[in-house]
Image (cartoon, rainbow, N blue to C red):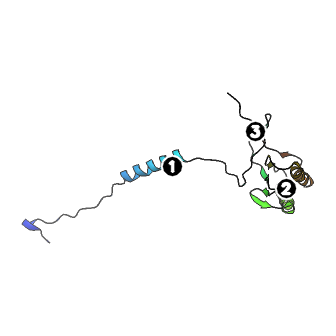
Amino acid sequence: MEEAFGHTPRTRRLLINITPLVDVMLLLLIFFMATSTFRDMRALDLQLPEAATGEKHADHPLEIALTEGGEISFDGVTMDHDGLRAALTATLVENPDAQFVLRADKRVAYAHVVTILDLARGQGIDQLILPVTTPKKAE
């Protein structure tokens, strides 16, 4: 097919320039990386007691959490005393060298903490980490 004045039409190839697309995507990536906050999220909101002599532990032990209301959770799963006993036994059979940490809210009655300590010791756990927060230093 001929166009006016006897010229044949040229077929144009469509080219998609992705440079602006890449630029926009990188800007969005940088924006979201700069505005995001990364925080260690816990299933339970606990306020740990303060202790000036607390030590940091690099390992990630299995967590037993005790809330102010008396709820018990093991590794993020809420359970009762019997469930905790069974979970501790199963964990120790699978990994005899497993480390455990007992995170108890500072408002929990001492009797509840002792009950969990006694239950853990009854399952063969001799060392249990009790985490605390260090007090803020006044400047």
Drawn side of residue 84 relative to residue 4, left or right: right
Residue sitting at x 77%, y 49%: 61
- Tell me: residue 19, above or below residue 78: above
- Which of marks 1 and 2 precedes in the sequence? 1
Report the magenta stretch's main SS: loop
**Residue 56's disc number:** 3
Q: Residues within 10 Å of mark 1 (few under 14, many from 20)?
A: few
- Which of marks 2 and 3 precedes in the sequence? 3
Q: Which residues are magenta?
A: 38-43
Answer whether residue 108 is magenta in the image.
no
Q: Which residue ends up furthest to the top in the rendered image?
A: 139
Q: SS at mark 1? A: helix
Instruction: Say what amino acid the circle numbered 1 marks.
Output: Phe
Drawn side of residue 119 relative to residue 63, left or right: right
The quadrant holding residue 76 is bottom right
The image quadrant where one finds the N terminus is bottom left
Q: x and y percent of residue 131 in the render?
A: 79, 43
Residue under label 1, please give it. 32
Drawn side of residue 57 relative to residue 112, left or right: left
Q: SS at mark 3? A: loop
Residue under label 2, please give it. 92
